Image (spheres, rainbow, N blue to C red):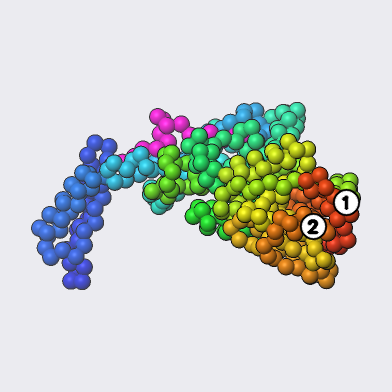
Amino acid sequence: MKTGHTDSAGYCLVSTAVRGDRRILVVVVGTDSEATRAEESLKLLNWSFQNFDTVKLFDKSQPGIDARVWEGTAENVKLGPPNPVSIAVPRGKAGDLKPVAQRTDPLIAPLTKGQQVGTLQFTLDGKVLRTEPLVVQDAVERAGFFGRMVDTVKRWFHQVFLNGEFVRIDEAKISVLDRGFIFGDGIYEVVPVYRGNAFRMAEHLDRLDRSLAALRIAQPFDRAGWIDLIEQLLARSNLDTCIVYLQVTRGVAKRDHQFPAEPVKPTVFGMISAWAPPSAASRAQGLSAITIPDERWLHCEIKSVSLLGNVLAKQQAVDAHVDEVLQFRDGFLTEGSSTNIWVVSGGKLLAPPKNNLILEGIRYGLMGELAAEAGIPFEARRITQDEVARADELMLSSATKEVLAIVSLDGRPVGLGKPGPVFEQLRAGYDARIAAL
């Protein structure tokens, strides 16, 4: 195609060759003669043909990507690059080339043929080889008034986030080989929202970070990304008082107990659930509980989706017709089935120490703050079962229960059998924090 020579660049050659439907282009610089540049160019051309394959994508044999369309005359549309794509990859790696779409969501009609709605990246072994526009392959007209109204209702009803997309909850699907499904290999967070404002979101995301690190699961988002996801979920829910549920599993891999040898992409799920804060009756009357042995594993500090121990503990409360259980390990208080437990003795607020035997609830730090504001002494230490039995007051706390008094334990009254003065002070402080959002 082109020859050249200078003292500084040496003998240079741009050459090309075609075999079948493949064309290779080679550039050689810095050789010491015309013969050498021709010989080296030929070597490179032969090596390229022998060691690389050309993969064709999105041609007539491969349809585009299916995407849901809202408020249109069709429910789905094909998306793809404007033209067929050919990419050279090392021989034997064609099956590892993956197209990754990043697109506008939701897609709302009308859509015109060729309209760009995102980008399409072609990746191999985690590296982006090429990026193409992602365009609509067939036009979709806008539906009539009734069709648009039905889709609007559907779009706002139970929409969840799963692996980069917002979908209806009945359309959300995961692989049966997801390690969260097979092993409970994942973590979760629950964030309460009042009047559209997430409560203690920074602390919840801090704990999510700790849980991911403890299980050595790759962090799928930075802090700004998690906040953006929560805000999008809230915007789509049309609920102002609700619960945000976030879950991350290790992802999809061949079933084997050890971590996958090759990195896999975590599965990320998020949803909004309607929720009502504790009723006036539960706040005024208090709750009942029983004591049971703590038979769970020894890493309770991780907010793991593997919750069978907690499920069995909660079922014991249900079977006993009480609200919660207080668990004890080796004679010392740990926590409830899904709550932190607080003991008041001699005017002092007590809690089990933060360690691997309890999950550090987000309200754990908050209760310490509220106690300090109210002038209530607070101490975190091991608490014996006898101390709990003789407590002046007992309380529990969690994202959904907030803070509530326990007035009956194992069928006997706690203190005077009604919410006590320390509870009332802490409850007032909690309400003030909510009001300040």
Q: Which residue is mark 2?
A: 390
Mark 2 or mark 1: name the one nearer the start of the chain. 2
Can the viewer see residue 116 in this picture?
A: no
Where is residue 343 drawn, in percent x and y?
77, 59
Quadrant containing the C terminus in the rendered view: bottom right
- Residue 2 horizontal/vertical position (percent): 22, 56
Label 2, residues with CA under 10 Å away: few <14, some 14-19, many ≥20: some
Q: Nearer the viewer, residue 192 or 390?
A: 390
Q: Nearer the viewer, residue 361 or 105?
A: 361
Label placed on residue 417: 1
Q: Is residue 88 magenta?
A: no
Give the tally of numbered discs. 2
Image position of 330 (left or right of 100): right
Report helix, strand or loop for mark 1: loop
Magenta-colored span = 53-69
Can see residue 215?
yes
User: Measured along the vertical axis of the image, is residue 355 above or below residue 309?
Assistant: below
Badge 1 amino acid: Gly
In the image, taking residue 52 as reference, residue 332 lies left or right, namely right
Q: Is residue 427 left or right of residue 119?
A: right
For the residues labelled 2 and 1, the Cα–Cα distance comes to 12 Å
Front residue (pair 7, 344): 344
